[in-house]
Amino acid sequence: MSDRVKEFREQRDRLNEAILARDNLNIKRFFGLDSAVYRDGALDSRTKEMLGLVASLVLRCDDCITYHVIQAKEQKVTDEEFDEIIAVGLVVGGSITIPHIRRATQLWQELAD
């Protein structure tokens, strides 16, 4: 695991714990829904991660992109599938997504090493 991924996960976990420790029921419900929606259902979790990556690219959320790139790699998404995910995100999101695609691709390459 790269230092970048380790640092991202540690910060995400630490901040999520801080948020959930505030004991707000609505926030806890939303976090629970976020976890539940990516579980296997009519669509498998792998497909849902690919959809999450496309949505994150279109929304231009670098934290979300980082999270879903890591998840996609862990779900054994292939390089060819990753390229198609990126292509869909680009077509839907337009040229403004290019800087985010660059960073996603950089992380994808780091995870391959």
Image (tube, rainbow, N blue to C red):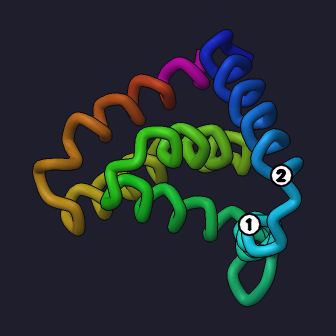
How many marks overall?
Answer: 2
- How far from the left and from the top, in percent, is residue 37? 72, 75
Q: Residue at x 59, y 23 (%)?
A: 112
Q: Residue at x 49, y 56 (%)?
A: 53
Q: Is residue 21 left or right of residue 8?
A: right
* Front of the two marks 2 and 1: 2
| Magenta residue check for 20 | no
- How far from the left and from the top, in percent, is residue 22? 83, 52
Q: Main secondary structure of the magenta part?
A: helix
Q: Which residue was labeled with disc 2?
A: 22
- How far from the left and from the top, in percent, is residue 82? 46, 48
Answer few, some or many: residues within 10 Å of disc 1's Cα (few below 14, many 20 plus, some between 14 and 19). Answer: few
Q: Is residue 41 left or right of residue 5?
A: right
Taking the view exactly as shown, the residue that stands out farthest to the bottom is 42
Q: Is residue 69 left or right of residue 22?
A: left
Q: Which residues are magenta?
A: 109-113
- How far from the left and from the top, in percent, is residue 11? 70, 27
For marks 2 and 1, the one nearer the N-term is: 2
Query: Would you say the residues marked 2 and 1 are in contact, meaning their CB atoms lie under 8 Å apart?
Result: yes
Inspect the image, locate mark 2, and give the three-letter code of the amino acid beneath it.
Arg
Taking the view exactly as shown, the residue that stands out farthest to the left is 95
Q: Residue at x 63, y 38 (%)?
A: 70
Q: Is residue 102 left or right of residue 75?
A: left
Element type at mark 1: helix
Q: CA distance from mark 2 to mark 1?
A: 9 Å
Q: Establish if 94 lies above or below 11.
A: below
Element type at mark 2: loop
Q: Which residue was labeled with disc 1?
A: 27
Q: Residue at x 67, y 46 (%)?
A: 71
Q: Establish if 7 lies above or below 101.
A: above
Q: Which mark is residue 11?
A: none
